[in-house]
Image: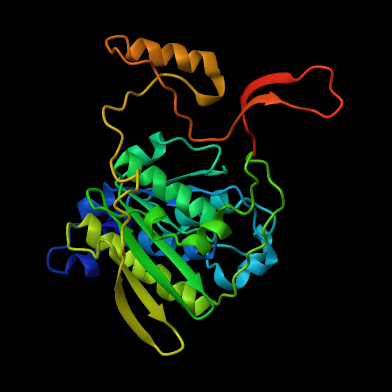
């Protein structure tokens, strides 16, 4: 065995000494990371070094100078570059075993549920409550485990939402959370203003929460027990950590995954609304019920313009 192969095989030697550790399981695992900011930097760095073999990271944002004091995978020369693409390049440099792919994309508009269905775990590293709720709902409806991390100035929490449990991310939102999450849009779905909800944060808190998330990921993928329906809460001021039971909503409509999902050989950008209705009729031909088309995005029907002689029929999705 040459030195290069010897070094690669020895890479995971110390962790493989842990009782019950299975490196092959980790190398064959697939993780979707939602977000590529400070928390994702810490989390992805950890799981890449651990040898979790397949990582897909999605974020539409670019790197700013204010990111650099909390992001080990970003450097001065990366300012204005895309976050997801930059993280992918950095991971390839720190562990060539890892297959990491990225999309410079908006989780709300560009990503369908198929992405969620074909991974072992979705991990939320997001600072936007609206997007966190959206990702959580997608995971619930596709029966995909969801690990969510959140931070504040001197603390944070990590929460598991697992298939088969009567709780999802949406259940945890109170009335004030919902107001914050949805205030960026009017009832029609149009953006009425951009909400700048920038939380104070520091690198040590990011490291702690990212470390807990990566540790929980290894436990889950290895088949070890994780704290489903619980929050792991860290208080950096008091240096305490505790678990908090999450309460579900028995009337929540997101607890049951979609049954009998049929995948189509179509790209979403190619489909028109009439195509969807025709496909719906095709797959519902043996049913006596009228086909119903449910869309997970706001949708134009008619545009009412001031002083217009005639309203314009649009029949199209609301864009970003």
Q: Residue at x 25, y 61 (%)?
A: 228
Say if residue 39 shows up in the picture: yes
- Whole-percent x and y of residue 21? 17, 62
State left or right for residue 193 relative to residue 144.
right
In the rendered image, the quadrant that contains the C terminus is top right
Q: Is residue 299 above or below residue 98?
A: above
The residue nearer to you, when weighing 222 against 270, is: 270
Q: Residue at x 72, y 52 (%)?
A: 193
Q: Residue at x 35, y 43 (%)?
A: 253
- Whole-percent x and y of residue 50? 32, 62
The residue nearer to you, when weighing 91 against 194, is: 194
- Whole-percent x and y of residue 126? 50, 58
Hey, which residue is sitting farthest right in the picture? 307
State left or right for residue 276 relative to residue 22.
right
Q: Residue at x 65, y 46 (%)?
A: 186
Say if residue 11 shows up in the picture: no
């Amino acid at each position: 065995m040459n030195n290069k192969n010897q070094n690669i095989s020895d890479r995971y030697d110390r962790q493989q000494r842990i009782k019950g550790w299975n490196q092959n399981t980790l190398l064959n695992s697939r993780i979707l990371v939602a977000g590529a900011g400070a928390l994702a930097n810490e989390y992805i760095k950890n799981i890449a070094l651990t040898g979790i073999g397949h990582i897909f990271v999605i974020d539409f944002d670019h790197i700013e100078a204010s990111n650099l004091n909390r992001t080990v995978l970003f450097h001065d020369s990366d300012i204005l570059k895309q976050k997801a693409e930059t993280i992918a390049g950095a991971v390839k440099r720190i562990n060539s075993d890892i297959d990491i792919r990225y999309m410079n994309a908006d989780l709300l508009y560009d990503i369908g549920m198929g992405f969620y269905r074909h991974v072992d775990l979705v991990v939320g590293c997001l600072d936007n409550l609206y997007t966190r709720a959206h990702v959580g709902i997608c995971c619930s409806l596709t029966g995909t485990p969801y690990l969510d991390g959140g931070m504040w100035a001197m603390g944070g929490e990590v929460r598991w939402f697992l298939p088969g449990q009567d709780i999802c991310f949406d259940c945890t939102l109170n009335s004030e959370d919902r107001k914050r999450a949805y205030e960026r849009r009017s009832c029609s779905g149009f953006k009425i203003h951009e909400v700048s909800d920038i939380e104070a944060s520091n690198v040590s808190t990011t490291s702690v929460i990212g470390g807990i998330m990566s540790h929980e990921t290894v436990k889950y993928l290895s088949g070890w027990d994780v704290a489903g329906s619980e929050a792991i809460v860290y208080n950096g001021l008091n240096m305490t950590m505790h678990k908090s039971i999450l309460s579900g909503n028995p009337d929540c409509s997101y607890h049951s995954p979609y049954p009998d999902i049929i995948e189509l050989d179509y790209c979403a950008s190619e489909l028109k609304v009439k195509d969807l209705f025709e496909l719906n009729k095709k797959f519902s031909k043996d049913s006596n019920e009228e086909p119903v088309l449910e869309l997970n995005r706001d949708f134009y029907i008619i545009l009412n313009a001031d002083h217009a002689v005639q309203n314009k029929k649009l029949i199209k999705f609301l864009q970003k």
